[in-house]
Every structure is written in C-alpha cells, then in structure tokens.
Amino acid sequence: MGIPKESLIKWVSRHLANISEDGSVNHFELAYDGGESGLLRLEQFSVEGDDTPDATEISTIINDVAETDASSRRGPSHLYAVMAFYGDDADHSSLTRFRLVGKASLRDEEIETEPGTEKGVTAQLMRHNEQIMMTMHRVVEATMGKLASDLDAERAKRERLEARSEDIAKLREELLDRKDERDAKAAAAAQNAERMNQILSMLMSQAPLLIAAVVGAVKKKASSDAPASKEPSLLESFKALLDEVDEQKLVKFAASLETPQQLKLLELVGKMRE
C-alpha cells in the first residue's frame, strides 16, 4: 500500500497529543466523501489501551483502508474524510480530508486473431477503436486525477495563507490597540502638565497680592497689639502673623518660591506653630 500524506500524519499526531474538556481522543473514523450524497462511513480505528499505535501507524492503517476502497470505485479520484471523536461524544470534534487517485476502470481484453477476410478486418478495426477509446479514457482519468490533486494542494495552500493572514490581522489589531493606549496616556500626561502650568501661572499672578496682604497684616498687628509697657519681639510678631494669615494664601505664596525656599518656609512655619 501507499504512504499516507504528511498532513494526515500531523493531524492525527495533534489529536493524539491533545486533551480537551471531554478527555483524550477516543477513536478515529474513516468515511468516503460522496459530495452531495454525504459521508459514507467505512471503518473505526480505536486508540484506547496501552498498546495504542503512534500517529504514523494509525495514518498508514487509515490510508491502506482508503486505498482498498478506492480500488473498487470507478472514477479519476476519490475524496475521503477522517473524523476524530473525544470521550463519549456521538459527533466528531474535528475532521480532515485527503484525496486518492482512482484506479483504471477499464481492463485490457485479450486480442483474438481473426482471418484476413472482410469480417476479420472489420472486427480488428473495431478492436483497435476500442483500444484507442480505452487509452483516451485512461488519459482523461489520469489528467482528472492530477487536476484534482493539484486543486487539493492549492486549497491547502490557500487555507494556510488565510490562516496566516488572520494571524497578521490579529497582530496588527493588537499593535494598534497598544498604540492607542500609548497615545491616550501621552495625551493624559500632556493635559496634566498643562493643568499644572495653569495652576502655577495663577499662583504667580497672585503672589503680589499675597505679599501685600502679609505686609498689611504685619503693620496692622504691630499697630493694634503693641503693649504700653513692652514692645513685642520680632518672633512673637511673626507667630501672631502666621495665626492670622489664611492657609490658602500661605500655600499660594509658597508656590511662587523656589524649591529650597519652599522647604525652608515650611520648616519655619512648622517650628513657629509648635
């Protein structure tokens, strides 16, 4: 018998190694694909037990049964389907097809000798015509079988290209999604930076008013709270000023300073309030 196709061996090997929710593969089944008439099931091949053959052996057995069936059928080529069944499922979980070239449907007949009469010559010419027709029929069968095999190869190639195209499309979508995510993060960061710039600009614009308010508060405190007998110290005056200055104004004033100055101001305010 012939050697099974590499695609059939890979398909069987993949199912033997696969374990789904329904368990491992239970058996394979060979069927003749009659087109519109549907699938004609031929034989089952169990893969349960400790002495289960490997993928190459199973594929060879399936191919031998298919070749034996094809030799009994007329036509240039025949299509067969192999189904994989898992667990106790009544229906197959996966299916693959392969095509076999048909055998010659006409047989040579023994040529009988005829005498050289008119009847004998006529019979000989008829046999010659029959042989020519048989030869032409074989040529057509071989050509159709080759065309069918080429069509199967082109179909398998097209399916591989379609699967690859789908993978490329999925990868492209993932890359576009990542790009959109990066663009969204960059836009959010730009908005945050712009918002901070606006806040700082507003604080800088309010800095003169804050300074004026602080100076006015100092003068007011110095004029109203000056004791008759003893003049308050500078430290006491500054502490009294901090008690009267609003927290929000103090924060705006600190925002107008450099970072080292802000730290010193915050440290001083903390000590004064302690």
Image: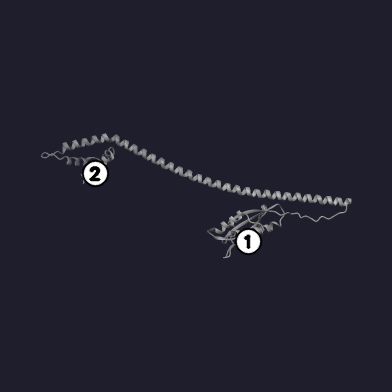
Q: Secondary structure at mark 2?
A: helix
Residue nearer the viewer, 147 or 187: 147
Q: Residue at x 26, y 34 (%)?
A: 209
Which label's residue is closer to the chain start, 2 or 1? 1
Under mark 2, the amino acid is Glu
Q: Is residue 101 left or right of residue 183?
A: right
Quadrant in the picture for residue 251: top left
Quadrant in the picture for residue 108: bottom right
Dot 1, crowdedness within 10 Å: few (<14), some or many (≥20)?
Answer: some
Give the numbered dot on residue 267.
2
Under mark 1, the amino acid is Gln
Q: Is residue 218 left or right of residue 229?
A: right
Q: Point out the residue furthest to the bottom here.
A: 50
Q: Point out the residue furthest to the right here.
A: 117
Q: Is residue 91 visible?
A: no
Percent across and percent down for residue 95 are: 60, 55
Q: Mark 2 and mark 1: span between their CA atoms? A: 88 Å
Q: Residue at x 66, y 59 (%)?
A: 64
Residue nearer the viewer, 112 or 23: 112
Residue nearer the viewer, 238 or 28: 28
Q: Residue at x 41, y 42 (%)?
A: 185
Percent across and percent down for residue 261 are: 26, 40
Residue at the disc numbered 1: 44
